[in-house]
Amino acid sequence: MLTNEDVEDLKQNIIGLQESIQALTVSVDKLVKAVSDLKTEYAVITNQVNRHEKWFHQIADKLGVKLEY
């Protein structure tokens, strides 16, 4: 048979678990946002690098220089 003290301990444990789950949820949300921001930044940087590479080839063509990798 459960005593009032046992029931109160269970309630406190459940409250602690709820708080832990809430904290984990917030942390996961922050992590997902950070990853999303990094993906967006990576896409922007990739486009910028591609644009610069195109410019380098245009400059090299005008100067008559062959670019090698």
Image (spheres, grey):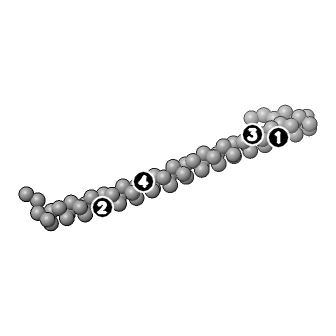
User: How much space separates mark 3 and mark 1, taking CA atoms?
Assistant: 10 Å
Residue underneath mark 3: 50
Q: Which residue is drawn at the image coordinates 57% and 47% (left, top)?
A: 36
Residue underneath mark 4: 25
Residue underneath mark 1: 56
Q: Earlier in the sequence, mark 2 or mark 4?
A: 2
Q: Secondary structure at mark 3?
A: helix
Which three-letter amino acid code belongs to the residue tagged 1?
A: Phe
Mark 4–mark 3 CB contact (< 8 Å): no
Which three-letter amino acid code belongs to the residue tagged 4?
A: Thr
Local packing at callout 4 (Cα closer than 10 Å; few below 14, some 14-19, many 20+) is: few
User: How much space separates mark 1 and mark 4, taking CA atoms?
Assistant: 46 Å
How far from the left and from the top, in percent, is residue 31? 50, 52
Mark 2–mark 3 CB contact (< 8 Å): no
Which three-letter amino acid code belongs to the residue tagged 3?
A: Asn
Q: Report which quarter residue 42 is drawn in.
A: top right
How far from the left and from the top, in percent, is residue 24? 40, 55
